[in-house]
Image: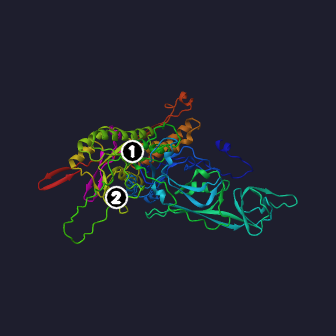
Amino acid sequence: MALRERLTLGAPGIYPRFNEPLRALTGVRMDVAAFVGVAPRGPSRLPAYLEPWAEPPRGMTAPGAALRSVAVPVESWEAYRRFYGGFEGPGLLPYAVAAFFENGGRRAYVVRVVHDYGEGDPENDAATAGGDAPGLTAEGGAPFRLLARSEGSWGNRLGATIGFRGRPLAYLEATVSGLTLNRDAPVAPGTLLRLWLSGGVPELRFVSDVRREWTPEDPILRLEATLETALPEVPERVEIIEADLTVTDRTDDGIDRDELHEGLGLSPLHHRWVAAVLHRESRLVRPDVSWLDNDLTIDDPTLLAAPAPADPQFSGGRDRYPDVVHDDFFDLQWVPGDEQARSGIHALVELEGLSILVVPDLYSPGPLIEPREIEEVISLAGPTFEPCVELPPPPEAPEEGDGSDGQLDGLQLDPTIAPDRDQIIALQQQVIDLAELLRSWIVLLDVPPGLNQREILAWRSDFGTDWAAGYHPWVRVSRPDDARVPLISVNPSAFAAGIVAKQELAFGVPHGPANEILTAAVLVTDSVTPARHDELHQSAINVLLSERDGIRLTAARTLSRDPQWRQLSVRRLVTMLARTILQQMQWAVFEPNDARFRDEVKRLLEGYLKQLFLANAFRGATPRESYFVRCDEVLNPPQVVDVGQLFCDVGVAPAEPMEFIVLHLTREGDNLQVVA
């Protein structure tokens, strides 16, 4: 009967029955990390019309409130460098991201933090480089001005040149106000035409309107293009004019970031309006608001080469590292359920795939490299003439505005000073509070450097959450492409994030992300003795030990005081279950809440849990010992069904990583036996 109701039968014959595809839960990705910190360049403070998900309108209006923070996905260290630069500036963000990818990470979101000077404060945009590209002028005489995509001295190394090219346009008929064209002519509103009059005089006109027309006498479809303003006489020939914009980045870091944007339109009506194209395609520049809604006029209708730009062409970019403060890492106006794009760490709240968070620049324990003391040269001149001694040149002063001498003064906290250490703990707890509220990603914390054993244990006692893990000690690295020669101390959480991602991709979430040798690590800042290691491990601090074959991550515990949630793999497994159900069972909304529907829900959940059981995610020997699913009339009586609710109970017994192997030594005569 049910089959007959679903099939529409016609003439006698054989009719195929197409079964509805069986639904199944497949799990979700849990290796994606996020890094929030300070970088010399990269997306930040984007005007509203430059939102990365927004398609700009044909006519782009002046921006409203800017997006101070933007989460950008990158899938390699080279991709990060293209957006944010290399090992430059005083922040640890580049070192942390590099450690993540070198230790097995595949995908990360990066948020660059810049200082918030207050809504509407002109100082917000005061450090963004800008420059004029000769050859174009906006209505009212405004120059064709471009701004660097983000603030920083890096923008001072930009250059931009505009060029033009024309191609002949065939037409059927021309008047002083328009053209009649074939139906496939490449002309649309906003197209710029160069119309040659008698005597070789060129005139430039925009096409304001294009209509498709035909008449009964002549049924062939044609285009009627109307010029923006009438010509003094009928043109002799016509060309379509397009612009090409070349943007160069003279940053000497081995990355080719130069851009060529071809076939640009000079009117907001054009389908490749230059402002819209720069929004969609450019990583280097954005349009200045002074000409967003205006047609651009070519200064020389003969299209001769534009004059050379000023040198330097772009200026005004500044690095403002000392201005960044702890509050810049948070959006104090955010409230749960707010879907508006937010700043700092809160720019991540709407990302569904995120599962690991590292904030390497939440505070600065000190400069990356201690400042060099300039030794005073003592004169050895005496009363008699002696051979000349060639003195070494004085140290070169850093280039003004390049940020090489700027430090994170507003973020500096000394962990060895009790009040500063309390402030560090408060900042870390603020990050944990957001993770506990969202219940979606784990925060990887660093034990503040420079603490003794008693202070480390005191730091640990301030946390009791399964949504965070703590790592100690910090790791010293040396980068061949870093102009700063000395070793740099880097957050251990960044290395741990890469190992977590690597283990998840290789073995799945149930596998404990530990017992791995770090890649690209040289030293640790604290050599933990076995006795100290015992104490730290029992306090759920994940220790990095320097061993003969390298630096090894020895544990993967959370900061929870509840033994059920002490293992990081258990917390991530349950998070994956919840995320999978939330994302892949949205179809259940508005389904008839009857016994058949409840049976299907139970089947889906049991099928997914069976997959995890076969992958050794649970400790039971049988499915019955490992998990259960209840979704019946007892949980869903009529009064529950009548209000549109469905309740299911899901219980699991996660397997915990084996941390201890106990050996019994016995002696029988002259033999020593080891029994596990």
Quarter of the image for residue 558 reads top left
Provide residue 413's location: percent of width, then percent of height: 33, 44
Residue 221 or residue 555, whichever sits in front: 221
Q: Secondary structure at mark 1?
A: strand
Disc ID at residue 443: 1
**Looking at the image, residue 315 lies above or below residue 457:** below
Residue 493 or residue 62, whichever sits in front: 62
Query: What is the C-alpha distance between the residues marked 1 and 2?
Result: 21 Å
Residue at far bottom of view: 387
Left or right, 113 with respect to 183, comes to left
Q: How many marks?
A: 2
Residue at far front of view: 383
Report the amino acid beneath label 2: Thr
The magenta span reads 541-568
Label 1 vs 2, first from the N-terminus: 1
The quarter of the rendered structure image containing the N terminus is top right
Q: Secondary structure at mark 2?
A: loop
Is 554 covered by the magenta stretch?
yes
Residue 498 or residue 403, whichever sits in front: 403
Disc ID at residue 519: 2
**Looking at the image, residue 53 lies above or below residue 251:** above
